[in-house]
Amino acid sequence: MSHDQNFKNFILDYPRAALEFFAWEEAGNIPPSARITPVRQEQLKKRLGDRFRELDTPLLVEFSREKKQAVLFILEEETETRYFSIHRLIHYCVDVADLLNITRVVPVVVFLRPGRYSLSLDLGTEHNTYLGFRFIACDLGEIPAVQHIESRNIVARINLPNMRHDPEQRVEVCLRAQEGLAELEPDPNRRIKYVDFIAQYANLTEAEQVQYEQRLQQSSYKEAIMAPVQQAREEGIQQGIQPAFFKIVVAFSGFTLASQCWLISLD
C-alpha cells in the first residue's frame, strides 16, 4: 500500500476539507470565495545533475486577485516519524517560496503513526536566532476518533480509522467512516474510491468483519454504502467479466466481508 499516494489523492480530491482538518489553525476560516489550486510538485533543478525534490501536495489558496494575499500550504505525509526530516522540510519550503516568489507559506506535516519528532528548529547562537522554523503537525494517531465521529468534514470522517481509538471501537469507527463517506460524498465514483481506502486502513479481522456486516445491516446508510460496490460489479459485467471470475476478483480486492457477501448474493 502506498500511503503517500493515498494521501495525495484525497488531499487533491478534497483540498478545502483537507486544509480545514489538517491545518485548522491557519485554514479554519477559508471563505467560500477563496480559490484553492495545486501547484507543481516537482521542484526545478538548479543543475542538470541535481536530483529532483518532490513535494507531497502544495496547495495555493488565493483570497483575492492580489498575489500578496495568497497563502501556500505545503502538506507532507509521513507514515513513520523516524523518516521525517525537519531540515528537508525547510529546504522544500525555502525552494518553493523562491520558485513562486511568495513569503506566506504554511508547512503542514501529517503523521500517520505516532512517534517523536521536533516541531521546530532554531539556528543561531546564545545571542541571536538567525533562522527560526516551525510547522503545523497533524498527528492522526494521537487524535481521538470519538471527537470526529459525527464530523461534517469528509477528510476527518475518511480518516477515522487512522485516529486513536480502543480496539473494541474498531468496527464502530470503520462503520462511522463509511457512513460519513456515504452521507457527505454525492459522487459515486469517488465513493467507490474511498470505500476501499477506509477498508484498507480499518484493516478489520475476520471476526470484526462479521460484526461490521451485522452493524451494516442496521445502518440507515446501508444502501448508500453498498451502492458503489454494486456499481463496480455492474461495470465489471459490462466489461465482460464473468460473475464467477468477479467473485474471485472481489475476494482479493480489499472489499470488506460485508461487501463480498452482498456482491455474491446478487448472482
Image (cartoon, rainbow, N blue to C red):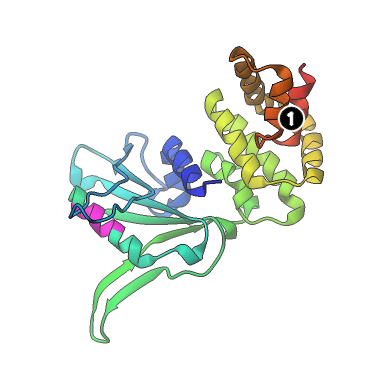
Please provide percent x and percent y for residue 118.
43, 70
Q: Is residue 263 visible?
A: yes
Magenta span includes 1: no
User: Which element is circle 1 on?
Assistant: helix
Does residue 117 appear left or right of residue 234 in this picture? Answer: left
Question: In the rendered view of the protein, which quadrant contains the C terminus?
Answer: top right
**Extent of the magenta region:** 92-98
Magenta span includes 97: yes
- Residue at figure coordinates x 45%, y 35% from the top left: 13
Does residue 125 appear left or right of residue 151 in this picture? Answer: left
- Residue at figure coordinates x 72%, y 33% from the top left: 251
**Along the line of sight, which residue is nearer the eye, 66 or 103?**
103
Q: Is residue 187 above or below residue 104?
A: above
For the residue marked with disc 1, what is the amino acid? Gln
Q: Is residue 133 above or below residue 228?
A: below
Circle 1 packing at 10 Å, graded few (<14), some (14-19), many (20+), is some
Please provide percent x and percent y for residue 165.
68, 55
Quarter where residue 16 is shown: top left
